[in-house]
Image (cartoon, rainbow, N blue to C red):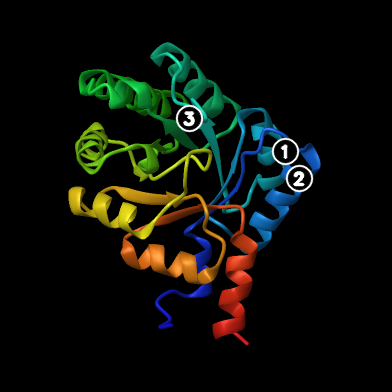
Amino acid sequence: MVKTLTREQLAKTIDQTLLSPTATVQAVQALCVTAKKNHFAAVCVNPSYIPIAKRILSGSDVKICSVVGYPLGANTIETKVFESRDNVKKGADELDVVINLGMLKSGNYTYIEKEIGIIVSVIRREQMAEYNKHINIKIVIENGALEKEEVRKVCKIIEESGADFIKTSTGFGTRGAELDDVRLIREVVTRNIGVKAAGGIKTFKDAQALIDAGATRLGTSSGLNIIDEYVELYDK
């Protein structure tokens, strides 16, 4: 395998993730300590754990990501706006927002455009007025539930909305990220928007392949294993 990233660069692709509904306080604390030690891009935790992550990661280079509309995406727009605002108010630097998959599967792209547009515009306006920091907004599309043409259409909408990333999956769907998912998204969008591959990424080999396909972030609970495998290969 050809080395294309330094250890530091690899670490900054990783969103160390713990979104299990049974995740304990202790597990979240351990997640944050590991992320801080390894200088990962972010931790991704459920909203109730944002204050714990903020306390542990304060002053570090690790961002706090939390979720909106997880995992089904079927909440109302108003609920998602409230959740987005509340997450940022509590300390989130990044939001992983699940689109309304039912509306998308119904072909209601007007609703999808409205939903994403409102969330992005509200957060952009308030980040400037109140928080003095850029909030990364990642829109989750659940590739495993979509046809290719649906992916193409929704990815164009997401990029035009001003969101920062398209995320392949929640980790709660029928499958996680696949190389063809990332390749398809990259066929549609420009390099001005990031692609977060998520779900089933367990090894450095998985990570490298997805990065080579065009992913710029990796949502995984196996960040430490990925880094350890990289070190074993290249930094002995």
Residue 82 visible in the displayed image = yes
Residue, x 69% and y 57% (percent of image)?
34
- On residue 131, which mark appears? 3
Q: Position of residue 158 (x, y in %)?
A: 27, 35
Residue position for label 1:
23
Residue, x 63% and y 72% (percent of image)?
228
Indicate the quadrant containing the N terminus: top left, top right, bottom left or bottom right: bottom left
Residue 100 visible in the displayed image = no
Which residue is at the far right? 26
> What kind of element bears circle 1?
loop
**Cα distance between the residues tagged 3 and 2:** 29 Å
Q: Position of residue 171 (x, y in %)?
A: 52, 43
Q: Residues within 10 Å of mark 1 (few under 14, many from 20)?
A: few
Residue position for label 2:
27
> What kind of element bears circle 2?
helix
Label located before the other in sequence (3 or 2): 2
**Label 2 close to label 1 by CB (< 8 Å):** yes
Residue, x 40% and y 37% (percent of image)?
140
- On residue 205, which mark appears? none
Report the side of 120 relative to 170 (left or right): left
> What kind of element bears circle 3?
helix
Residue type, mark 2 in image:
Ala
Residue type, mark 3 in image:
Tyr
Q: Residues within 10 Å of mark 3 (few under 14, many from 20)?
A: some
Foreground mark, 1 or 3?
Answer: 1
Report the side of 123 relative to 114 (left or right): right
